[in-house]
Amino acid sequence: MAKVIFFAIAIIVFLSIPLFAYAEENSGTPYGDYCKDCTIYGTCKEIISPKGAMMALDRYYREKGYRVGAFYHKGRFVEAVIFKDSRQVDVVLFDRKTGRLRSIY
C-alpha cells in the first residue's frame, strides 16, 4: 500500500513540473524595472519629457531584442506596446517622474 501511494505522489509531482517550469517568457518586463537614464533606482533628477521617455524606452527594449510599437502619453505616464518580431509580448507603463517601468499586460 505504501508503495502505491509513493508512486501515485511521484507521478503527480512528475506531471506537475511542466506547469511550474514555464515562467512568463513572453513578457518583456514581467517584474518591472527602472530607466537607465535616471541616476538612482526610482528617482530622476527631473521629470523626463514624453519624447525623452519614448527614446529611453526604445533604447531599453532594443538592447533586449524587442521593438516598441505604439506610445500613448497619459499625464506623467507613457504607455508602450512591446513586440518580439511581429508578436505583441507586453504593454508597459513608464513613470516619467520616478523612472519606474511596469508591465500592465
Image (cartoon, grey):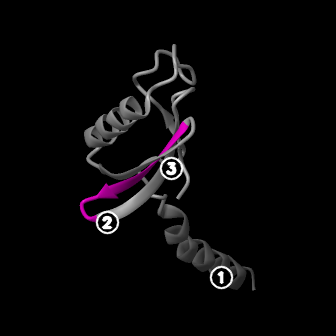
Q: Is residue 26 visible?
A: no
Q: Which residues are magenta?
A: 77-86
Closer to the camera in the image, 26 or 12: 26
Kind of residue sitting beneath label 1: Ala
Q: Residue at x 54, y 39 (%)?
A: 77
Instruction: Name the residue beneath numbered marker 2.
Output: 87
Instruction: Name the residue beneath numbered marker 1.
Output: 8
Is 68 left or right of 44, judged from the image as shown? left
96 relative to 6, above or below:
above
Kindly identify which numbered label has been placed on residue 30: 3
Q: Earlier in the sequence, mark 1 or mark 2?
A: 1
Q: Residue at x 62, y 78 (%)?
A: 12
Q: Is residue 12 magenta?
A: no
Closer to the camera in the image, 83 or 8: 83
Kind of residue sitting beneath label 3: Pro
* Other residues around mark 3 within 10 Å, as few (<14) / some (14–19) / many (≥20): some
Of marks 1 and 2, the one in the foreground = 2
Q: Image quadrant of residue 6?
A: bottom right
Q: Secondary structure at mark 2?
A: strand
Quarter of the rendering occupied by the N terminus: bottom right
Please name the predominant secondary structure of the magenta segment in the image: strand
Q: Is residue 11 visible?
A: yes
Image coords of residue 50 (percent x, y)? 43, 34
Callout 1–callout 2 Cβ contact below 8 Å: no
Q: Residue at x 54, y 77 (%)?
A: 15
Q: Is residue 82 magenta?
A: yes
Kind of residue sitting beneath label 2: Arg
Q: Image quadrant of residue 42?
A: top right
